Image (cartoon, grey):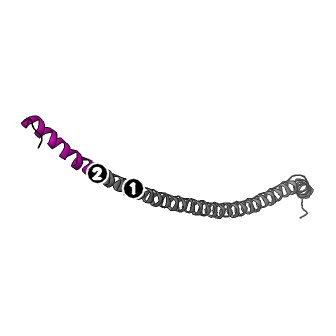
Amino acid sequence: MIPDLSVLWVIFFVLLCVFVLNTLIFQPILRVTEARQGAVQAAKTLAETAAQKAASASAEYDHTLNAARTEVYRQMDDTRRAALDRRTALIDETKRQVETEIAGATTRVATEAAAARDTIDREAGAMAGAIVDRVLGRSA
């Protein structure tokens, strides 16, 4: 039993088709697929690196922002304390001035009251004499 030559031709053409298909279609497709996988992996790596840099920059920004806020709040507190100290000093100075003016006014009023009493006492005697002269018609 001799194999039919057509079987050998079929085997030859199948092997030839496998070689041609492998060389012209499957190998280029595999290369493209591997290149895509490499590109995807590179993109993932780049994205992870960018995400880490963004997280680092965000943390640094938050730290800088908190430090700036702390400084601003400290400056505001210092300014507020200085303003309160100045206000207290102005109130104390005003109180001293008012107390001095009140003391001076009290002294002036007391002096003027004493002078008015003296004047009234002197004039009261003269007025009494004038009233007696008019009412009685004679000098008292």
Residue 113's label in the rendered image is 2
Check contact, mark 1 vs mark 2: CB within 8 A: no
Q: Residue at x 77, y 58 (%)?
A: 43
Quadrant of the image occupied by residue 1: bottom right
The CA distance from mark 1 to mark 2 is: 14 Å
Is residue 112 in the magenta section? no
Quadrant of the image occupied by residue 66: bottom right
Q: Which residue is drawn at 49% across and 57% down?
A: 90
Give x and y (percent) for residue 96.
44, 60
The quadrant of the rendering that contains the C terminus is top left
Left-right relation of 86 to 134: right
Residue labelled with disc 1 = 104
Q: What element carries label 1?
A: helix
What amino acid is at disc 1?
Answer: Gly
Give x and y (percent) for residue 23.
91, 56
Q: What range is drawn magenta here?
A: 113-140
Mark toward the start of the polypeptide (1 vs 2): 1
Q: Residue at x 28, y 48 (%)?
A: 116
Q: Residue at x 40, y 58 (%)?
A: 99
